[in-house]
Image: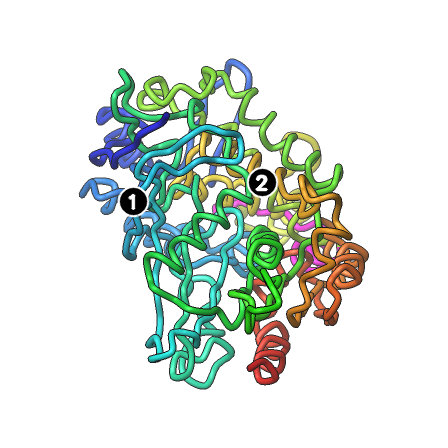
């Protein structure tokens, strides 16, 4: 049996390293070298505690400096060319602590299993005006920071009509029980890689306890989510979207809207998850995921590269070509004094190749990898990608067809036409498995991240669908 409590704020890096990192002012976004080389980052801040950036004053200040640095020092096309999918990420919200030992699908047990969550709007007297919104792989409970255009009065997640609930999933580092939690009655500071394997079925089951037992909700109008959040929506349908008996008036979940996902994680998606994990394992500071080791020497290089791999898979070839092409970042200083020298220098800048080619796309990816270190840790990333790989609605239910055959609630499946990570044929299969399903396709060059970035199209489909649900 695992027991956990929240740990006091502590950094993945030593105080001495923090001071060095905060003093560093390197013009390039990062030099990320695996093997026996070092990692140098530009004003790098490392994720701390279960509270995202942590509560340590120096780390909060560091993250503030990072925001200033982004505005002042990294103004190239590479930094601004692609819209970012997330706003500021924190662990704000309330906590639901499961009152009994929580038995995982594996048979292992977590005591004091905790979910951080946020609510928006007001619960009505009948306790059924509820929308549940599920976040993606690296998201949190702060719905307003990543789907903010959909939230508020007279918007798809209309807070004048709905009580909107968003919970940080089990295993995530934004306030819920995770590898960074402290196990009780054990001689170690954190679970680390000893954190039990959690399945997506476990995560949804704990959220159902939050909704029913913690918030006293009688019924949920709809569960909505994209990517990993969409997988949760599918699992909500399987667990609570079918009538238990003919005497039941309606199921607990009355509709679902899974976006940019399929009925199960495929070999393609597992492979992309695995190569990200392998990047982390290849970091010489990985040390089998030991948090005690990571406090002094975190595997920043591996985690940064893993994030960069993800950022490529979330977008499209056309999107990258349109934003970056073959552009390079040219030097900001010049020694040219004549027109001929200036033309020669310009020609030289446009003909970089090999190790001298500072491609804008390279700088963008390095920037994204570096920024990610301020809000996530390597062990949590490994564990959450493993949880995502567990997604298979038909597992232990007799297959996908049987699992959803009795789920007659209205289901809106949304795909992104350019998504190479979760291609449209998977949404076409998923909608065929729902007896009462319909399919909508978002037109976008943004790829998988279109579910976050194309909020006007996504929101329009959601709003139209919800208007027809009792």
Image spot of residue 98 (x, y percent): 33, 45
User: Marks 2/1: CA distance?
Assistant: 39 Å
Asked if 197 appears above or below 78 in the picture, the reply is: above
Instruction: Give me the residue at 32% from left, 33% from top.
Output: 181
Instruction: Give me the residue at 44% from left, 35% from top.
Output: 103
The boundaries of the magenta stretch are 318-335
Front-most of 169 and 296? Answer: 169
Local secondary structure at mark 1: loop
Q: Which residue is mark 2?
A: 308
Q: Local crowd at mark 1 within 10 Å, few (<14), some, or many (≥20)?
A: few
| Marked residue nearer the N-terminal end (2 or 1) | 1
Asked if 188 appears above or below 127 in the picture, the reply is: above
Q: Which secondary structure dominates the residues rendered in magenta?
A: loop
Front-most of 462 and 374? Answer: 462
Image spot of residue 144 (x, y percent): 40, 66
Q: Local crowd at mark 2 within 10 Å, few (<14), some, or many (≥20)?
A: many
Q: Nearer the viewer, mark 2 or mark 1?
A: 1
Quadrant (top left/top right/bottom left/bottom right) for the N terminus: top left
Q: Is residue 11 left or right of residue 220?
A: left
Instruction: Give me the residue at 41% from left, 31% from top.
Output: 109
Can residue 266 be seen by looking at this rendering?
Answer: yes
Q: Is residue 330 magenta?
A: yes
Image spot of residue 436 (x, y percent): 73, 70
Q: Which residue is mark 1?
A: 99
Q: Is residue 242 magenta?
A: no
Can residue 358 be seen by looking at this rendering?
Answer: no
């Amino acid at each position: 049996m695992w027991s956990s409590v929240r740990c006091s704020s502590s950094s993945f890096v030593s105080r001495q390293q923090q001071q060095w990192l905060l003093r560093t002012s390197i013009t390039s976004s990062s030099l990320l070298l695996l093997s026996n080389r070092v990692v140098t980052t530009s004003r790098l801040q490392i994720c701390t505690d279960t509270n995202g950036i942590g509560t340590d004053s120096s780390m909060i200040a560091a993250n503030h400096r990072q925001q200033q640095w982004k505005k002042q020092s990294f103004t190239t096309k590479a930094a601004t060319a692609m819209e970012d999918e997330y706003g500021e990420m924190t662990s704000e919200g309330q906590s639901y602590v499961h009152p009994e030992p929580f038995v995982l699908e594996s048979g292992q047990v977590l005591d004091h299993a905790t979910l951080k969550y946020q609510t928006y709007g007001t619960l009505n007297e009948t306790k059924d005006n509820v929308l549940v919104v599920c976040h993606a792989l690296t998201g949190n409970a702060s719905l307003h920071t990543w789907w903010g255009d959909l939230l508020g009065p007279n918007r798809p997640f209309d807070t004048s009509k709905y009580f909107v609930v968003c919970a940080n999933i089990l295993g995530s580092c934004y306030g819920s029980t995770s590898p960074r939690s402290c196990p009780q009655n054990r001689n170690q500071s954190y679970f680390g890689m000893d954190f039990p394997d959690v399945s997506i079925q476990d995560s949804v089951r704990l959220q159902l306890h939050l909704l029913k037992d913690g918030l006293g909700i009688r019924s949920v109008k709809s569960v909505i989510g994209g990517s990993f959040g969409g997988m949760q929506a599918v699992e909500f349908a399987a667990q609570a979207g079918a009538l238990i008996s003919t005497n039941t008036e309606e199921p607990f979940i009355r509709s679902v809207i899974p976006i940019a996902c399929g009925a199960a994680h495929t070999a393609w998606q597992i492979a992309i998850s695995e190569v990200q994990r392998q990047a982390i394992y290849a970091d010489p500071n990985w040390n089998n995921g030991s948090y005690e080791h990571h406090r002094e020497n975190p595997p920043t290089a591996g985690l940064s590269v893993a994030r960069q791999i993800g950022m490529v898979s979330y977008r499209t070839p056309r999107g990258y070509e349109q934003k970056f092409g073959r552009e390079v970042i040219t030097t900001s200083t010049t020694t040219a004094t004549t027109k001929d020298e200036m033309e020669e220098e310009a020609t030289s800048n446009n003909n970089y190749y090999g190790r001298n080619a500072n491609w804008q796309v390279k700088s963008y990816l390095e920037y994204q990898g570096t920024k990610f270190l301020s809000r996530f840790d390597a062990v949590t990333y490994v564990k959450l990608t493993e949880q995502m790989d567990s997604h298979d609605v038909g597992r232990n239910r007799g297959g996908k067809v049987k699992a959803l055959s009795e789920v007659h609630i209205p289901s809106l499946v949304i795909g992104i036409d350019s998504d190479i990570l979760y291609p449209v044929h998977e949404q076409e299969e998923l909608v065929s498995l729902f007896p009462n399903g319909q399919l909508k396709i978002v037109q976008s060059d943004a790829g998988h991240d279109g579910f976050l970035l194309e909020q006007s199209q996504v929101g329009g489909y959601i709003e139209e669908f919800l208007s027809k649900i009792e």
